[in-house]
Amino acid sequence: MNKRVLNIILISLVAISIFGGVSVSSDETIELRLFTSQGCPYCNEAKDTINKLNQTDFDGKITVTEIDVYTSAGFSEFRENEFTVVPSAVVNGDTKLEGINDFGESSLRTLFASILETEPEEPTEPEEPPKEFEKSIRFFYEETCDYCKVSKQKMYDLIDEKGYEIEVIEVDVFTSAGYQEFRDAGFRVVPAAIICEATMLEGVDEVDNKMQDAIERCLAGEPPVTNGRVVAPIGLMAAFAAGFFSSLSPCLLAVLSFIIAYTVGSGTKALNIFLKSVFFGLGITGTYMLMAVAFITAGAAIPQNLLFYLSLAGASIVFFLGLNLINSGLNIVELPISKKNFGQKMTKKLVLSYGLAGVFLLGMIFAVINIPCAAIILPILIDEAIHGTTYTATLKVLLYGVGLIVPFGLIGGAGALTKNIARDMRWNPKVRFFGWVVMGSVIVAVSFYLLYQGFLIVETVTTQHILYSILAYAIIMFIAGYAYGKWKKVDKGDNRKKEIPAY
């Protein structure tokens, strides 16, 4: 009898411990006081993560009390907990979370599970829903920017006209947080906008002309586009082609022919000839890399309303250099300034005395003093200063350098067999015509493209913009006409005979 009673007592205790433990666990909850502020996107993200865990893993056991820190009582409690940023939270009166990094789904799941003494359920990868972009527009502006005001009004008018259901969040870049977000996004000029957290528009042209398409793609759930954040393949191929054809410029071939001649004359091995040709191209590329950084820095520092004049100045310089190349090919005007003897002496000294380092330095020097011979690089740099970033500018200059170095390497390799190849190419009529006349014509056409890009920058093209453009090109044509009247060659055939290539 006593044994039977003992068994009943033991069974009862086991049942109580099992069901009692379940009932305690089911009654246990988490009290979470969440501090947020209006217009804080990270706060919404934190709330969504907590609500998701509450509805899935923890069966509603989390009680959330949201506290707006912009209220007097909310801010007082926020400061009492020594918080400095939102979102932040106090869990069950003792555990504190601060900053969006503390609200990751995995870390919150582990924290809540440890409090409730349950095993966290790790979701499998296929169960993760695809990311849905928040249907919002983050519009970056400056209070003193007239273009921003016009673009902002156009954006609101478009939303009202089309009836788009999309939230607009205005971000003043003159505030500390606004400027930081503006820079983190990679923007340089206002107005700018981020649609659906991914599509990025920068400048009046993109914001005004591409806003509607970006909003419609956002609302339709289509993949975002990355305007201005990705370099178009056509732009990269153009940079490579510009470098390749620049290498065929007769004045660069002249320097290369001197390098090969002096190296062969010194009895150096074939590999050294090839390396010196490549290092000459690397020196040129290195200078243009520095110029690219300088152009981008200058473009970022220039106010939006002055970018048109930067574009006009660049277009005018490019136009002048294009005319200079055409003149070099057609041999119309003989300018009174010549760098021939200076270039030959410098080449001889650097090649013979300093080896590869000297050739690299020679490339850097000639990239500056012979920039008219490689004038196609200027439109690339000017366009990047107005519309590009350091990343895109660096990438294009690198590809320009690859396009330049490949022919130099081939010519240098062939020069190990015969030192005359660079000289022969330099004096070949077809190479001279293409390297100067054809490329000069292309550069003249590109100058008008730069001018067109300048017109796209301004909100409204005025008579003043047109008059300044006409005046700039008229001044260059006047200079060209003066040079033609002053230094026109009378007998081109004799002059050509006087210029005998020799080493």
Image (cartoon, helix red, strand yellow):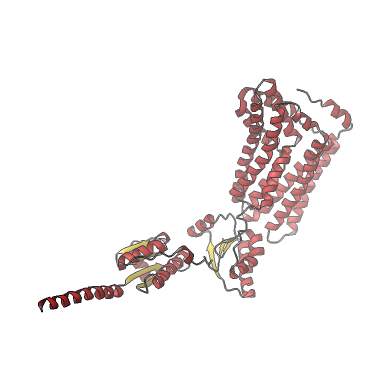
Residue 206 horizontal/vertical position (percent): 65, 60
Q: Nearer the viewer, residue 284 or 56?
A: 56
Count numbered badges in the picture.
0
Is 339 located above or below residue 467 in the figure?
above
Is 19 located above or below residue 224 in the figure?
below
The residue most toward the left is 2
Q: Image check: 400 left or right of 33?
A: right
Q: Quadrant of the C terminus?
A: top right
Q: Could you say which quadrant of the image residue 59 lies in? A: bottom left
Residue 382 horizontal/vertical position (percent): 67, 47
Q: Is residue 143 visible?
A: no
What residue is rendered at 62% in x and 69% in y? 216
Q: Image check: 152 left or right of 438?
A: left
Residue 351 horizontal/vertical position (percent): 65, 25
Q: Quadrant of the N terminus?
A: bottom left
What residue is rendered at 73% in x and 56% in y? 465
Q: Could you say which quadrant of the image residue 326 lies in? A: top right
Q: Image check: 278 left or right of 23?
A: right
What residue is rendered at 61% in x and 28% in y? 356
Q: Nearer the viewer, residue 219 or 298?
A: 219
Q: Could you say which quadrant of the image residue 30 lies in? A: bottom left
Residue 470 horizontal/vertical position (percent): 78, 51
